[in-house]
Image: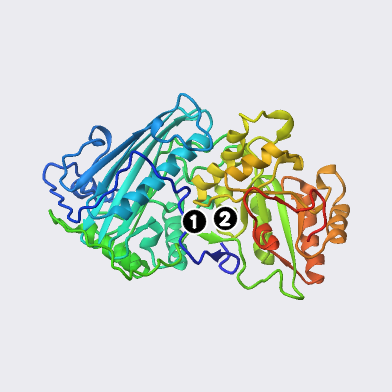
Amino acid sequence: MSSTRAHQNKAVPEPGRRVALPWLPGVTAMVLLMPLAGCGVGGSASGDPDAMAVLVDGTGENSGSTDHEGVTVRTGDADSFDDHPYIPGGVDISVAYPEFEGAEPFSEGLAERVDTEVADFRAGTRDPVALTVDWQITAAAPDVLGVRLVRTEEDMHGLREGYSTHWYDAASGHTAYSTELLADQEALETVNGLVRDQLADDGDVDTATLHPVLRTYDSMGFNDAGELVVEFDDGHLSPVVEGHVPSSEPGRKTAVLDAEEVDPLLSDLGQRAREASLSDEEQVTVAAAGPEAGEPGPVPGVVSAQDPDVDCYEDGTRCIALTFDDGPHEHTPELLDLLSEEDVTASFFLNGNPALSRPGTIRHIYAEGHEVASHNDLHENMPEEFDEEELPAQVAAVSSMVRRQTGHSVELFRPPFGAGSEAVLEEIGEQGMAEILWNVDSDDWQDVPTEQIVANVVSGAAPNTIVLLHDPLETTMEAVPQIIEELRALDYEFVSVSQALGGAEAGESYPPGGLGAPAP
């Protein structure tokens, strides 16, 4: 990843969805009693360095247990999640997670994240069958709590497990992602390098798919030696198999990083989380959040496609947005390397099947600071091929796939062929996205020669123009270097679509004048 290309978000991202769930009552008590005797114990007792320390094990038959004082187990089924964009019939949902007395913000944060997991499993997998979410408590101290969620998923591609570990900073009332155990984005990049080195000789791992993004590093904790355990979902790091999803057969992959090596990379929360993971305290009191608790800082692994040094609407600034449709493709990593070398930001509009088969490339796009957007699930003319009842699934699919790989919530949607309708636009808006067409068509899809593609783009360029390109096409790949060179000679800044537009409002279509209209 080019450290000069990606820009970290300045604020904590909102969870994928924030909803009020009727099956989640509030929590008001202030004392957490955690008697460990008789509790299921994981890594601490086993001595397995690949296992996180576990104080209470709520997985399997223990998932609905409520015999731990100060801990209430919340459960839900398919009927508990009735407001998602797409709800396929016949899918079994069974979730459980703990709530703690005195940690209401943590309960709310876990509820939101579980809700997002269910929504994205429903929409972002093929023929979903069942999802189970179980829990473990990995740390409990007056100032920090840790909960590991274990997902068991079944769809047409088989059975697999996934993992995420969530942390609560009682002093601030903040529900933290695992990456917030680290000091900053640079620390996450260092960890990413250490993990890559450790897994380099594993034939079941494609280290090119490792990128320092939120969802790759969403499950980190500490073992009984204080080492940092980094775990990855089944198949998350598996090599690409053309036309198929990466194999989940290798199962859970882990990297265990030396405590002394990791120590300078930890945040204050990370230091306290490690201490809590090693504690054998049998009773703790959760401190209430302070009245003047500050806002949490940038979240490592959350990358922005906005260049803070460019104002597209400042006099004399000329911005242009290059967009690439129909990927990710085997050409896309090569294109990303070129864009990184040239310090160019672009926007990528992805389809469902390529996204499922090349998830590592989605993470690569996001990690490099490009805008990740949706080009619908299937590359079909939406008004002609789908009735209104089919639109929710089509619109939701890629958004969920992207969030499952990066943590990023997609905000832009481009219908295939630019073919929309009132019903399509309404569905896009209801799912929180704006419709994005284009001002300039490169005509690369018309099988024109490379020189013509370049000429079409350069001659049509104007400030804040959106340009249509396709990264799966050889001629486009050949044209991009020359497009960059000629536009840069005309003093253009390459930005994301959102930045070129100055922001895009959900439910609106851009450009305002319609397909091919000049930029405003």
Q: Are the two marked residues, 1 and 2, in contact with CB atoms closer than 8 angstroms?
A: yes
User: The N terminus lies in which quarter of the figure?
Assistant: bottom right
Q: Residue at x 16, y 44 (%)?
A: 68
Q: Secondary structure at mark 2?
A: helix
Look at the image and tell me whether residue 20 can be seen.
yes
Judged left or right of residue 453, residue 117 is left
Q: Residue at x 64, y 63 (%)?
A: 340
Quarter of the figure with residue 81: top left
Q: CA distance from mark 1 to mark 2?
A: 8 Å
Depth check, front residue: 264 or 65: 65
Label 1: how many Cα within 10 Å (few below 14, some 14–19, many 20+): many
Quarter of the figure with residue 280: bottom left
Depth check, front residue: 375 or 288: 288
Q: Secondary structure at mark 1?
A: loop
Q: Residue at x 20, y 49 (%)?
A: 55
Q: Residue at x 19, y 44 (%)?
A: 41
**Is 318 located above or below residue 247 in the figure?**
below
Q: Which residue is mark 2?
A: 366
Q: Which residue is mark 1?
A: 213
- Disc 1 or 2, which lies upstream in sequence? 1
Image location (x, y in percent) of residue 177: 39, 56
Residue furthest out toward the left: 37
Look at the image and tell me whether residue 243 can be seen.
no
Image location (x, y in percent) of residue 267: 35, 67
Label 2: how many Cα within 10 Å (few below 14, some 14–19, many 20+): many
Q: What is the image's colouring?
A: rainbow
Depth check, front residue: 144 or 357: 144
The kind of residue on which mark 1 rests is Val
Depth check, front residue: 34 or 195: 34
Image location (x, y in percent) of residue 231: 38, 49
